[in-house]
Image (spheres, rainbow, N blue to C red):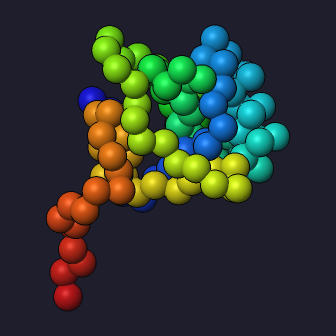
């Protein structure tokens, strides 16, 4: 499982992509479709057309990480819809998405600010 820090901005692309694309083409999609800088350190999540796999792109200051998760059975049932190019998730929601769950389910907050 990938650890995602709560401070990382997470953008989920609404439109499906061809998952044969590599780092350079997915970074180009970040610029063109999501209007986001792939060198920003944000976490970008894309889904395949069939919904059986997702690809994650992130720049860590030295280079890009490109991760793929392909389900052996079933599909990623939840995926955002709308007129925008991307949907923003919080870290705990992204973890639910990576586990093929529904990030919009109500759950206890991951952390609370200590007063």
**Coordinates of residue 12 in the picture (x, y in percent):** 55, 45
The quadrant where residue 96 appears: top left
Residue at (63% x, 54% y) in the render: 82
Q: Is residue 55 visible?
A: no
The quadrant where residue 106 appears: bottom left
Q: Nearer the viewer, residue 74 or 45?
A: 74
Position of 9 with respect to 71 (left or right) is: right
Q: Quadrant of the C terminus?
A: bottom left
**Coordinates of residue 49 in the picture (x, y in percent):** 60, 23
Q: Quadrant of the N terminus?
A: top left
Residue 96, compared with residue 107, is above or below; it is above
Residue at (63% x, 11% y) in the render: 20
Residue at (54% x, 20% y) in the render: 50
Position of 13 with respect to 107 (left or right) is: right
Residue furthest right as drawn: 32
Position of 2 with respect to 38 (left or right) is: left
Give the number of marks: 0
Residue 79, compared with residue 9, is above or below; it is above
Q: Is residue 73 visible?
A: yes
**Coordinates of residue 94 in the picture (x, y in percent):** 38, 45
Residue at (73% x, 22% y) in the render: 24
């Amino acid at each position: 499982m990938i650890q995602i820090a709560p401070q990382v901005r997470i953008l989920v692309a609404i439109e499906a992509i061809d998952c044969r694309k590599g780092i350079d083409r997915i970074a180009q999609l970040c610029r063109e479709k999501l209007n986001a800088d792939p060198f920003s350190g944000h976490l970008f999540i894309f889904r395949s057309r069939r919904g059986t796999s997702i690809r994650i792109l992130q720049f860590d200051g030295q280079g890009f990480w490109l991760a793929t998760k392909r389900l052996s059975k079933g599909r990623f049932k939840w995926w955002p819809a709308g007129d925008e190019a991307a949907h923003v998730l919080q870290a705990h929601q992204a973890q639910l998405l990576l586990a093929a769950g529904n990030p919009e389910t109500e759950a206890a907050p991951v952390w609370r600010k200590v007063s």
